Image: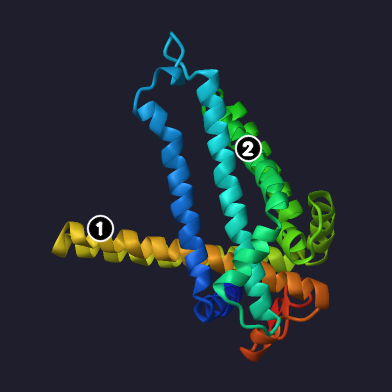
Amino acid sequence: MGFFDTIGRGWKMSKLSMAVVRKDGELMVYMLLCGVLSIGAMAAMSLPQYLEQSWTQTSDGALSPAYMAFIFGGYMSISIIVTFWNSAIIANSHIRLTGGDPSFGDGFSAAAKRIHIIIIWGIIAGTVGLLLKILSNAGKGSDNGGAQIFVMIIQIIGATIWWMLTFFMIPHMIIEGKSVSESMKSSRQMFSKTWGENISSGLGIGIITFLFGAIIAVVTFGLMAVIGPIGLIFGGLAMAVLIMWSSAAEQVAVTALYIYSKTGKMPQLYQDMGVAEYTFPTSVNVGRMS
């Protein structure tokens, strides 16, 4: 897959996903609430130590088991928060991409109805994410260069496999109402059918987001040279909007690819914008979006 093919494919998918976000401004509100609640949870995790409460440390200055359990609970809370609002976005975008006109309450209520499954999956996903992070930190902390490379490879392979297995988890849990185990099985099967589309869409949106981020960084530095700290505030706000947009667009893309995997056709909204197919390039057919 050529670099510029990826950019072109991602640019189209980004524009289409952005069109859905533009039609449904509540998707950005979902991401804003997700960010605010996640930051609140992170602040709550740090507050006891910031206040120097005695229960956070042992007599030798190490983190106490109670505080580590508290941090773990906070980390799981963040995972559940992210899963909940991603579920709301996918439920809302599914309504839009299947011809409906969703409101803020539609996505929220769809996620709320499956809150028990969301909590279970949030804890599972959060635990796996934490283990991968611990593995990554263990590799970075090693003095052995070979061990660092080995651990990094294992971490990347593990993260990639997990991403592939869980790519369509939320649509199956929220849209189809399946259990966690059933959703995992269905997600794995669905991903195996459309792995190319999933990879190329993710890479494309990621590249476009990175390019926009680089532009914002350059503009921010320029503004700081002219108007000082106000330029930094502008850059921070612009970057926050970019993060919310890209996060919402990624979930919309997952929904579109879920529909594509189920029906063999792109959602009608995408077809109306000129994308009837979304295929991964092969040695015979070097990618086609029509």
Residue 2 is drawn in which quadrant?
bottom right
- Specify the label residue 182 is tagged with: none
Q: Is residue 141 left or right of residue 163?
A: left
Question: Measured from the top left, where is residue 252 in percent x and y?
Answer: 62, 70
Q: Is residue 289 above or below residue 282?
A: below
> Which residue is disc 2 drawn over?
132
Q: Is residue 9 above or below residue 111?
A: below
Q: Which residue is labeled 1 in the image?
A: 232
Q: Give the residue type at disc 1.
A: Leu
- Tell me which corner region of the image, top left, top right, bottom left or bottom right, holds residue 287: bottom right
The reply, left or right, for residue 84 in relation to residue 32 is right
Residue type at mark 2: give it: Leu
Q: Coloring scheme of the render? A: rainbow
- As drawn, is 231 to the left or to the right of 91? left
Q: Secondary structure at mark 1?
A: helix
> Which of the image's four quarters has the C terminus?
bottom right
Q: Secondary structure at mark 2?
A: helix
**Where is residue 153 shown, x and y percent of the image?**
65, 39
Of all residues shown, which one is farthest toward the top? 59
Q: Foreground residue, 241 or 99?
A: 99
- Classify 10 Å Cα crowding around label 1: few (below 14), some (14-19), many (20 and above): some
Quadrant of res 286:
bottom right
Residue at 26 percent of width and 59 percent of height: 233
- 85 or 192, which is in the foreground? 85
Q: Position of residue 127 (x, y in %)?
A: 65, 38
Q: Is residue 242 visible?
A: yes
Whether 49 is drawn above or below 212: the answer is above
Q: Residues within 10 Å of mark 2 (few under 14, many from 20)?
A: some
The answer to whether marks 2 and 1 mark residues whose Cβ atoms lie closer than 8 Å is no
Observer-nearest of 198 and 79 = 79
